[in-house]
Image (cartoon, helix red, strand yellow):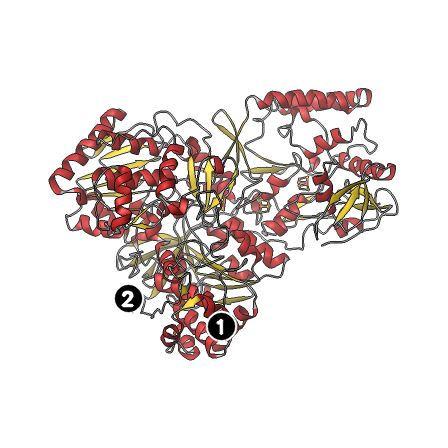
Amino acid sequence: MAVTINGKPQAIQLGDRLIDVINRSGVSIPQVCYHPQLGPIQTCDTCMVEVDGTLVRACGTTAAEGMSVVTSSARADAAQREAFDRILGNHLLYCTVCDNNNGNCTVHNTTKLLAVEHQQIPYRAKPYEVDMSNPFYRYDPDQCILCGRCVEACQTLQVNETLTINWEDPHPRVLWDGGAPIGESSCVSCGHCVTVCPCNALMERSMLGEAGYMTALPKSALDGMIDVVKGIEPEVGYGPILKLSEMESDMRESRTKRTKTVCTYCGVGCSFDIWTRDRHILKVEPAHGAANGVSTCIKGKFGWDYVNSPDRLTKPLIREGDAFREATWDEALDLVARKFTEIKAATGPDSLAFISSSKCTNEESYLMQKLARAVIGTNNMDNCSRYCQAPATTGLFRTVGYGGDSGSIYDIAQAELVVIIGSNTAESHPVLATRVKRAHKMHGQKLIVSDLRQNEMAQRADLFLRPRPGTDLIWLSAVTKYIFDNNLADDRFIQQWVNKLDEFKQSLESFTLQMASERCGLPVETLIKVARMIVDAKTVCVLWAMGVTQHTMGSDTSTAISNLLLATGNYMKPGTGAYPLRGHNNVQGASDHGAMPNYFPGYQKVDDPEIRAKFEKAWNVALPPKPGLDNHMMIDAIQEGKLKAMYLFGEEMSLVDSNANYVSDALSKLDFFVVQEIFFSETCRFADVILPACPSLEKEGTFTNTERRIQRLHQVFEPLEDSRPDWIIIRDIANRLGAGWHYDHPSQIYEEIAPLTPLMAGVTYERLEGYKTLQWPVAAEGSDQPLLYTKQFKFPDGKATFFPVPWTEPTDQQDAEYDLHLNNGRLLEHFHEGNLTYRTEGIREKTPCTFIEVSPELAQERGIETGSWVQLTSRYGKVRAQAVITTRVHGKELYMPMNSTEEPVNRLTSSYTDKVTHTPAYKESSVQLRVLGPVGQDPLPPTNSRHGHPTPQAGVEVERKWQRKDYRQPGNQLVQIQTR
Ligand code: SF4
Ligand code: SF4
Ligand code: SF4
Ligand code: FES
């Protein structure tokens, strides 16, 4: 199919937007409001072209076979100019003194493209103040061209539904919650609106006065310069004025650095350019991220102040009695090497243990496990996937073979039905959640949520289940049985692709709807509805997280999810599959690269003689043949006196491990403890040597996100003062122990990993340059697999297998003394305990502390108000915090976010674990509640977005603009071709 553009043929595909076809052809037309990731907004009218003699908006028109498109006829040109003239009536061109004068301002560039010299419609200021009430960005109504990109982004991409434009007002502007100050609105500071704003109306506050050479001048001086520009424009035209500003913009190039990196927080793996001037972060600019496009959440967009925090560790510290003293690197590393050697000689290699960080790079995890195995000689090696993800991996190993998401975030967005189980996705994986929210709002995707808590996704769901704690396995199995009993299973798929059907069906016998209804507290009709929705959908993705995995049945419930997907044929095609949402930025990668007690990199078993021989040959050492201790077993081994020394990096173990008091006690008993960190964490208190490391912005390497997507991070800053990248510290310790490693760059580490690891055989730094990514498995020739199972499952016969799982009672159950169930998890604004995020002032201001969510029923029964101080006591410890009364929780269910180092929720959790993986049963916790003292203020301040009042609407609603009396379509004979 083809169209002609100015007489030249141009190929098109079904459904192409005309504006994309024109852009592909290389013809330039103005397009101020158009953003490919938002779709047609149609507010600016600057993209007018003639199609078969009729003026249309190119962005709002679908290309069709044979169209004759003329972009530069007199009519089209006049319409484009008229439309842009109206825009200039809303915007002052003071580019030379504007912080947005960086070569990418759409208003500036369109002025240049159209060679505008003078405007017809004079600029008119709007009768509103600049809004500076959000700590991260500001809105200047006087520069706002009312393009509506921000509204569209907030309503249909982020789907926070905060922004609107009051089109009917004499002076329209962008509104937050219908007219609240930004800082008191429902805005979650995700930054989407700021990122897509085509000019300087919305800007990051970190840019203001920092990006330009003259933008830091006092306001009076700036106003004076703006007046000069306005004064000379009628005389000289915009041409010379723009030239001057472009010279200034070019000068900025020499001091503004833009570096692509990957977010250091959650497993979504957003990537973006970081703009810096010296060590100042000007802004985070997402644009082409494979996982995120233009999207970010508050943490990735604005949560980077920790990198330059004065609290950073910059010198090695050595314990002396109860205190630490600064030391040189040589002294500290020599001490580590000497103590490791002595302890290994005295009590053997298995009396040492190593814990890698899922916040650090793949290359660093690889080196850590190589240090443990090849240099020390132990498999006592683990990472924090033990605390969250190992059960999901087990469920997938058992049934489909690979321990990773079945597809991409793109598949989740495409699915007809998404089922979310035990995941607060909108807060824990915010950008991934936006894809579900968008598909649900805009494209008719259906959503089922099963959770103890009515979180945002549950509020949006078509069906929300609130099963009793620890009973997900039961309803999943009952729904699967119902599907079989009513001949609704995908028999053809099962016959071709799944083993052990009969055994599995038998195992389901006890899971009747009645039994599930009684145990889970869910009506039978609801369970039938779940089954019907699943079988009625052509494509289903199931997303789950720690509400499933952090139970004694974590592995089994994960298995039950995969069984259900197999029974309904929801693998092996786009828009289907299993998606355990990985928590940390590199929790997938840490395990992939061998930071586990039983696997070399690529899940190659340490007790397989052939595999071991391969690594022995490559590393030129004899390797220990038996799996080592996982991090849960390590704590017990310390308590038993068997484990003497530990080397841990980038992990706040004393707070994030379950039963924190017991863990801290164990850490205090170590003979020698090395902690490598960027801040003096709680865990550092137990260390003998503390080594100052670098955050992700100060190093090179790769991260692997939840989609198995490997992405490169490029170094933004030099290491702060005397801190060092983790891979260099690990290398130097290994070399002091005689390893003879010669890595000068992380790429050399990957050159060693790839040939040893079939899963990553084709991974090279060249193939990951810039924004290029690979989703494992990566074949030697470089092809990857966004959809994991296309030709077969990862078992010798290529088939998947049903895996029967029984249900067992949860642990740490409620009784008369501990009568409330405590749930816990993340908060949007903070990452985990908040060691990084509390160092961003704006985040601290909006979420200064943790709190305890109490249901209105329980609050009434116990006389608790929002702000009441309460003490929770479990069988393991106690914490104090203020209550927040909310319908998000129900009955005797409490919820405590984990963002506290002073009152960590894990003082309350137990040492029970998942039977298979030893993942702590964080979500099986009973407590008693005591009300303390007088009522204080709401722990969520008035500036917290949870107090806001969103204003949902379909998008920017441009039709309301077109209905204004003073609106006239530019050009004539305009025919509106609607595509939305
Ligand atoms: S939530 Fe706030 S930051 Fe995010 S798009 Fe909406 S208004 Fe902008
Ligand atoms: S603030 Fe919104 S409407 Fe105004 S120019 Fe920016 S994106 Fe467009
Ligand atoms: S925390 Fe997660 S969702 Fe937020 S920007 Fe980082 S990777 Fe993206
Ligand atoms: S680009 Fe704005 S209407 Fe088409």
| Residue 636 image position (x, y, % from top left) | 20, 52
| Residue 199 image position (x, y, % from top left) | 67, 35
Q: Is mark 1 within 8 Å of ligand 3?
A: no
Q: Residues within 10 Å of mark 2 (few under 14, many from 20)?
A: few
Q: State which tag comes first along the sequence, 2 or 1.
A: 1
Quarter of the figure with the C terminus: bottom right
| Mark 1 element type | helix
Q: Residue at x 31, y 69 (%)?
A: 809
In the image, residue 582 sits, relative to residue 259, either above or below, namely below
Q: Nearer the viewer, residue 480 or 225?
A: 480
Q: Residues within 10 Å of mark 1 (few under 14, many from 20)?
A: some
Q: Residue furthest left?
A: 346
Judge from the rendering whether residue 899 lies leftward or rightward of residue 642; answer left or right. Answer: right
Q: Label 2 sits on what residue type? A: Glu
| Residue 128 image position (x, y, % from top left) | 69, 39
Q: Nearer the viewer, residue 630 or 285?
A: 630
Q: Nearer the viewer, residue 459 or 114?
A: 114
Give the label on residue 512, or none.
none
Asked whether the beta carbons under mark 2 and mark 1 sit within 8 Å of each other, the answer is no
Give the label on residue 817, or none.
2
Residue 278 visible at all: yes
In the image, residue 2 sits, relative to residue 476, either above or below, namely above
Question: Could you say which quadrant of the image residue 361 lies in?
Answer: top left
Question: Could you say which quadrant of the image residue 247 lies in?
Answer: top right
| Mark 2 element type | loop
Q: Nearer the viewer, residue 137 or 316?
A: 316
Q: Label 1 sits on what residue type? A: Asp
Give the label on residue 491, or none.
1
